[in-house]
């Protein structure tokens, strides 16, 4: 029994940024349920549960790169190494252009980036664009 | 390599040794020549003696025959006669080289002829009358060489020849002695000179060897000193590189981590503004705006700092780059940042090629052109020019504007991070752009400098690689 919800998994260690990301999504009229993993280890746990069907698959994963314990890139690798969850769209949140360089050099199959600007208005705008695309326009891969 | 003096001395030594050898050889030649002349003279004297002896033999054989009528003696006599002429011929050939002797010989010949004729008369008489006693008057002729024609005897004629030869012998002996002496002298002098040369050569060789030894020792010292220096430089370089990397890593992570709280401040001050705007008056809203502006400025500073550290950390990849094209592309971005501005850009239409890292150089141009654009914002008829010129055979590139310029008194502060020559009120800026540009140019092993005058514009010159 598989169950997909239209939930979003947010992987973010900073509670302030978590609050701001959720605020930005809500301001962009994203009504989906938002689950939060507070570090890389927790995120990998959750992904294991999506894979086994213990938890319903999310529609989108928002992944911060700077995480305690397990780095964001390792979470990304873990996602891409699974069978089913590998097809999930992952949007990476980066603090700087340099991290984008790192990610692209790894070629880990990132679907998008949001560079988190200092200015919240810019961040909210970028989030709105992404939310629109990934949650409304993009066809989620069929889950077997 | 060698100084000219050395070469001349070398050639001189060889010439002198050769000359010595030649002199010695020549004096040997003279000596052996004189010796052979001496031998020749002695041979001539011997021939004279032999001729005289044979004449005496003929005389005594003839005398015996006349006395005893012994046919054996007659045979001896006729043998002697024939060998007399042989000897005479020999003497003539011997003295062919001497005309004065040749003049004496006919007299000798004529004397021999006369003497033999006198003897022959007696012999013929005995032959005709083998048993008769001969009259003494007949025999007297044969007893001695008494036929003096004009007072010359055979012996005298021959002694004339001998006398000349003896004179020659004396002269030639003297010549031989002289030649020997000069050969000895020449040999002695030559040997002495050669010895001196050898000694000099050895002495110089010794000196040279010592000098070389010294140089070798010194160069060993220099080498070991160099190696020490090299090692120390390497150690220092490694230490510097390590501390530099630490600093870079530090500034990078600090700037990076500073962005997170800034985002929080900005996000929540905006949330405050949005959610509680009705509870705030104008003053409160103004404060929130000021908070957000401060955050904005700090964000820009952190971005500039990050760029500064990135310039130092990233690898330098040199390739042939068209600077004019690069400038055109940057100018496009700069214009887009404020499309309303009326600025004339002057960029060469032909490629300006240089070996550079286009990514890093783009950052440099962004800063230089950004500055020019910024500082001409209050200048009517603003012109910004990119160009290149040759100075001391090296290409110098420049960005020139006719904007606010600066006071040359502060020129040394231009390229220092966080040093600003204009207040934020007039021109916004981080004070890091030119420091970043300086680093980029330095990484290209180039130089950057500026000229300017207040309110008359500024020119930034730079070179790439030497």
Image (tube, coloured by chain):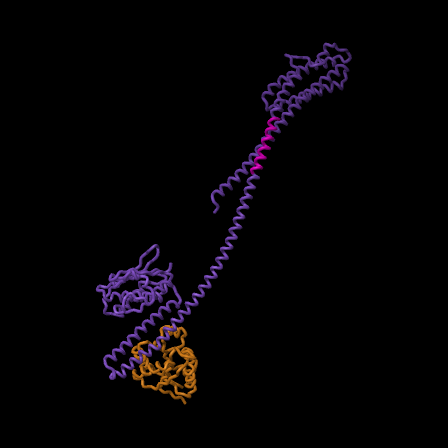
Chain colours: A orange, B purple
In the visual, does B430 lie left or right of B138? Answer: left
Task: Name the residue rendered at 27%, 83% in the picture.
Answer: B276
Q: Position of residue B33 (x, y in %)?
A: 60, 30
Q: Is residue B110 above or below residue B39?
A: above
Q: Position of residue B255 (x, y in %)?
A: 36, 73
Q: Quadrant of residue B298?
A: bottom left
Does any portion of residue B112 appear in the rendered image?
no
Q: Position of residue B44 (x, y in %)?
A: 64, 24
Q: Quadrant of residue A71?
A: bottom left
**B33 or B120, which lies in front?**
B33
Quadrant containing the C terminus of chain B in the rendered view: bottom left
Q: Position of residue B234 (x, y in %)?
A: 46, 62
**B211 or B280, which lies in front?**
B280
B385 within the magenta span: no
In the visual, does A37 lie left or right of B327? Answer: right
Task: Name the residue rendered at 37%, 85% in the picture.
Answer: A35
In the visual, does B245 lie left or right of B43? Answer: left
Q: Is residue B266 above or below residue B235?
A: below
Magenta-colored span: B173-193
**A130 or B230, which lies in front?**
B230
**B366 or B333, which lies in front?**
B366
Residue farthest toward the bottom in the current orientation of the protein: A1
Q: Please identify the dominant SS of the magenta region.
A: helix
B184 within the magenta span: yes
Q: Is residue B173 above or below residue B358?
A: above
Q: Quadrant of residue B288?
A: bottom left
């Amino acid at each position: 029994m598989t169950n997909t919800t239209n939930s979003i998994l947010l992987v973010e260690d900073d509670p302030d940024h978590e609050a701001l990301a959720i605020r930005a999504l809500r301001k962009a009229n994203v009504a989906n349920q938002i689950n939060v993993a507070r570090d890389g280890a927790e995120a990998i746990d959750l992904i294991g549960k999506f894979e086994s069907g213990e938890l319903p698959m999310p529609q989108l994963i928002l992944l911060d790169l700077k995480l305690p314990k397990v780095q964001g890139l390792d979470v990304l690798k873990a996602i891409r190494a699974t069978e089913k969850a590998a097809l999930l769209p992952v949007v990476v949140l980066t603090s700087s252009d340099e991290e984008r360089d790192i990610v692209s050099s790894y070629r880990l199959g990132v679907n998008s980036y949001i560079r988190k600007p200092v200015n919240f208005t810019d961040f909210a705008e970028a989030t709105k664009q992404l939310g629109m695309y990934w949650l409304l326009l993009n066809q989620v891969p069929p889950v077997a | 390599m060698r100084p000219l003096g050395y070469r001349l001395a070398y050639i001189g030594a060889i010439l002198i040794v050769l000359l010595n050898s030649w002199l010695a050889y020549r004096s040997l030649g003279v000596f052996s020549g004189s010796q052979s002349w001496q031998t020749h003279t002695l041979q001539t004297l011997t021939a004279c003696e032999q001729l005289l002896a044979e004449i005496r033999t003929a005389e005594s054989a003839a005398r015996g025959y006349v006395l005893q009528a012994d046919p054996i003696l007659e045979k001896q006599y006729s043998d002697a006669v024939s060998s007399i002429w042989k000897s005479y011929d020999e003497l003539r050939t011997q003295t062919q080289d001497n005309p004065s002797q040749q003049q004496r010989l006919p007299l000798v010949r004529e004397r021999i002829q006369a003497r033999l004729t006198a003897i022959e008369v007696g012999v013929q008489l005995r032959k005709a009358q083998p048993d008769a006693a001969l009259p003494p008057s007949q025999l007297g002729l044969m007893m001695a060489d008494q036929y003096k024609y004009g007072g010359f005897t055979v012996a005298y004629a021959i002694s004339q020849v001998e006398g000349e030869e003896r004179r020659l012998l004396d002269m030639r002996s003297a010549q031989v002695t002289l030649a020997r002496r000069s050969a000895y002298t020449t040999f002695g002098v030559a040997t002495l000179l050669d010895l001196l040369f050898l000694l000099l050569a050895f002495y110089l060789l010794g000196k040279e060897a010592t000098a070389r030894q010294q140089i070798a020792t010194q160069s060993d010292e220099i080498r070991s000193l160099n190696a020490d220096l090299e090692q120390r430089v390497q150690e220092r370089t490694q230490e510097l590189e390590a501390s530099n990397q630490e600093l870079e890593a530090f500034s990078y992570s600090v700037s990076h981590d500073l962005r997170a709280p800034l985002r929080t401040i900005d996000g929540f001050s905006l949330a405050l503004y949005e959610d509680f705007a009705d509870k705030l008056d104008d003053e409160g809203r103004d404060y929130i705006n000021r908070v957000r502006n401060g955050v904005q400025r700090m964000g820009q500073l952190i971005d500039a700092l990050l760029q500064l550290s990135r310039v130092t950390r990233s690898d330098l990849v040199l390739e042939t780059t068209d600077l004019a094209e690069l400038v055109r592309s940057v100018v496009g971005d700069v214009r887009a940042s404020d499309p309303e501005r009326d600025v004339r850009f002057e960029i060469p239409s032909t490629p300006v090629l240089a070996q550079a890292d286009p990514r890093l150089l783009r950052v440099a141009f962004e800063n230089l052109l950004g500055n020019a654009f910024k500082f001409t914002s209050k200048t009517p008829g603003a012109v910004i020019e990119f160009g290149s010129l040759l100075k001391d055979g090296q290409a110098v590139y420049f960005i020139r504007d006719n904007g606010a310029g600066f006071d040359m008194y502060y020129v040394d502060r231009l390229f220092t991070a966080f040093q600003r020559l204009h207040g934020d009120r007039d021109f916004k800026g981080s004070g890091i752009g030119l420091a970043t540009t300086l680093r980029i140019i330095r990484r290209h092993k180039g130089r950057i400098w500026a000229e300017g005058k207040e309110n008359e514009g500024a020119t930034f010159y730079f070179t790439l690689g030497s």
